Each structure stands twice: as structure tokens, then as C-alpha cells.
Image (cartoon, rainbow, N blue to C red):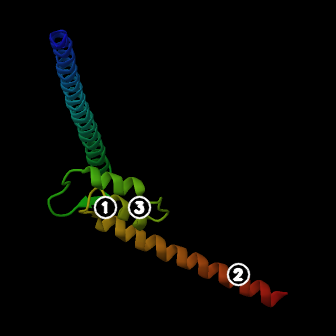
């Protein structure tokens, strides 16, 4: 009867071997699927980065063109020293956006210099600004004189 055990043992061994090979095949399939997913994720990430780079480039070109137009339309007030517009970069644009709004002309020029570092006011503009400051000082002096006269008369 022991010879009847040989086919049974053979069947068990074959089942174990088949089980191991099917597990191995399944593991290989899963590894290939994970590899494919990683490759697709890398491609999507690269495409996204390229699209963002194209958007940034287009944005900086648009800002650069607007800045050139601004300088041309205000050439009596603003001048570029040195080599002129060097080109807007994404970093310059981020700094410009993050800067707080400025009320004074000098503050606004400081913010503009984030985009065009060589920008400065023209001598004519500086002279007009000097004259405006002198006028404001004279007006303040007249106001003080008026207050003094009113205080004396009361």
C-alpha cells in the first residue's frame, strides 16, 4: 500500500510548486504595475513642471513688455541707468508682489526697482519734487502763521 502514497505525495509536491510559482508570478505582476505607476507619476510631474515653467516664462515676458511700455510712456520721469531693463525674473516678480503698497514716490520707485533695478527718477522729476516739497513746507509755514495770528487775536 505504500506505493499508493507515491502519487499522493507527488500531487502535494506539484501543488506546492505550482502555488509557489503562481505567488511568484503575482509578485512580479505587482512589481511591474508599481514600476509602471511610478513611471507614469514621474511623467505627469515632469509635464506639470514644464507647464508651470511655460506659464512663468509667459508671465515674465508679459510683465517685461509692460515694464518696457511703462518706461517708454514715462521717459520724462523715469530713466534707466546702466544697461537698461535686464529682464524680469520669477524671483523679482514674487518680491514685487509681496512688497506692500507705497504712498510716496520714493517708496514706489523702491518697489519698481524690484523689477527694474537700474530705474531712477530723471533730473527733471527730481527738480519738480524738490519744488513741490518746498511749496508744501511754505504752505505749512503759512498754516502755522495763521494759527499763531488766530491765537493772539483771541
Residue under label 3, please give it.
108
Q: How many angstroms separate mark 2 from mark 1 (CA)? A: 41 Å
The residue lying toward the viewer, choosing from 118 and 89, is 89
Callout in the foreground (2, 1):
1
Residue under label 2, please give it.
146
First in sequence, mark 3 or 1: give its number: 3
Task: Evaluate whether residue 21 shows in this view.
Answer: yes
Q: Position of residue 151 (x, y in %)?
A: 79, 87
Q: Are marks 2 and 1 in contact (CB under 8 Å)?
A: no
First in sequence, mark 2 or 3: give its number: 3
At x 14%, y 10%, the residue is 3
Query: Relative to 71, is 45 above or below?
Result: above
Residue under label 1, please give it.
113
- Residue 83's label in the rendered image is none
The residue lying toward the viewer, choosing from 69 and 16, is 16
Query: Relative to 85, is 11 above or below?
Result: above
Q: Position of residue 60 (x, y in %)?
A: 27, 44
Circle 2 residues within 10 Å: few <14, some 14–19, many ≥20:
few
Amino acid at each position: 500500500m505504500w506505493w499508493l502514497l507515491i502519487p499522493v505525495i507527488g500531487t502535494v509536491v506539484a501543488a506546492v510548486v505550482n502555488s509557489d510559482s503562481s505567488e511568484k508570478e503575482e509578485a512580479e505582476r505587482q512589481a511591474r504595475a508599481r514600476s509602471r505607476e511610478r513611471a507614469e507619476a514621474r511623467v505627469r510631474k515632469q509635464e506639470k513642471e514644464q507647464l508651470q515653467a511655460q506659464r512663468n516664462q509667459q508671465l515674465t515676458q508679459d510683465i517685461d513688455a509692460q515694464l518696457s511700455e511703462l518706461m517708454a510712456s514715462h521717459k520724462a520721469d523715469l530713466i534707466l541707468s546702466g544697461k537698461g531693463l535686464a529682464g524680469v525674473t520669477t524671483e523679482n516678480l514674487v518680491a514685487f508682489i509681496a512688497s506692500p503698497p507705497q504712498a510716496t514716490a520714493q517708496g514706489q520707485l523702491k518697489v519698481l526697482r524690484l523689477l527694474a533695478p537700474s530705474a531712477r527718477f530723471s533730473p527733471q522729476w527730481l527738480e519738480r519734487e524738490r519744488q513741490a516739497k518746498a511749496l508744501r513746507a511754505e504752505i505749512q509755514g503759512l498754516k502755522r502763521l495763521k494759527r499763531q495770528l488766530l491765537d493772539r487775536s483771541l
